[in-house]
Image: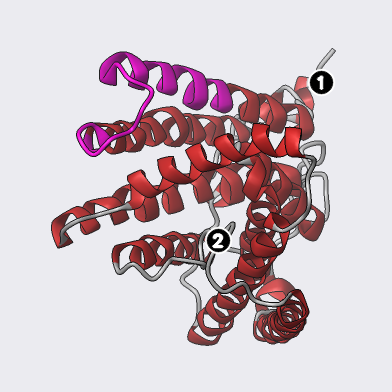
Amino acid sequence: MIDTDRHTPGDSFVERNEINPFVFAFLTLFITFVLYQLVAGGLTYLIVGDTNITRENVGRIRLLTMLGQVFFILIPTLWFARLLSSDWKNVFPWKLPRLPEMFFAVLGLVFLQQIFHIYLFLQDRIPLPESLKRLIDPIRQMLEELYRTIVSAESVPELLFVLLIVAIVPAIVEELFFRGLIQSTFDRVLSPLWSAIIVGFIFGFYHLNPFAVIPLIGIGCYFGLLRYRTGSVALAIIAHFLNNALAVTLVYFHLDDGAMFPPRSGGEQPESGALIVQLVLFVMLFAVSVYAFYRVTSRDVANASPPVDTGVVEGR
């Protein structure tokens, strides 16, 4: 039986009912997954009437994708946030980053992208049994063509629209959901670093791309680190936008060959030894940039408020 004397009228639904934060987080993840992947995906199929994305229907699919993120991720996120806390700042802490924070965060992101470009190339060269290769290659090709069609633009106005759909909206919606709602929930029962790592793994698997799950997990953990060290979702949103916007821009200017998707065969293939050397170099540069980022954010971490304990209310 819940002791109502321990709670005040200002407590949230989760606090009043003493709901375990892990239970709340995973229920939130499950419900949002069903809403976006199944409900929004089903509605998109009913409206478009085709599972194939072509130049003729890509505009409608882009628009429906954006609406799906807003109505089936963002709005539920805001509703769940209100259940978690009566104060928005406890769920979506907001503070504009200082210039040194921004510089080292973006620098780290650039090095991390290079690390994962090399990783994807090396991953593609792993020898597989021919039977498994025949199964995997068509799926991978389908995902790559799907992504290219979504992000490709043939004019500046279309490029701006693609940036809205692929970079701006996902950066805001996904960061408020993962680094805002979910990470804030885990912060109540875990250390901030572990919370960032776990949410990063969830972020990677949530995207349902088995061929890029490791890079997605790495990027997710990095965004979580930015949120943890700055005590704000703002820098994570900015980094997420830059990450996606760069991919769109590379495709638009035809600079993505061998960058976003490593070549499978044909053409000049770099030596594995040279790639390993580059990989080690970029890992070292990334480590240096993260160390510098830790140094410039030490004040933010020192001044950060401790996680909220739902079972303890000050003064009671």
* Residue 205 x %, y %: 67, 40
Q: Which amino acid does label 2 sit on?
A: Pro
Mark 1 nearby-residue class (10 Å; few <14, some 14–19, many ≥20): few
| Residue visible at 55% across and 61% down in the picture | 263
Q: For the residue labelled by badge 2, is the local secondary structure a helix, a strand or a loop?
A: loop
The alpha-carbon separation of the residues under discs 1 and 2 comes to 62 Å
Question: Which mark identifies residue 3?
Answer: 1
> In the rendered image, which quarter contains the C terminus?
top right
Tell whether position 41 is magenta. Answer: yes
- Residue at 68% across, 28% down: 14
Depth check: 98 or 238 in front?
238
Residue at the (80%, 40%) spot, across then down: 129
Q: Which of the pair 266/208 is nearer the observer? A: 266
Q: Quadrant of the N terminus?
A: top right
Whether 150 is among the magenta residues is: no
As drawn, 204 above or below 284: above
Which residue is under mark 2?
Answer: 263
Quadrant in which residue 119 is drawn = bottom right
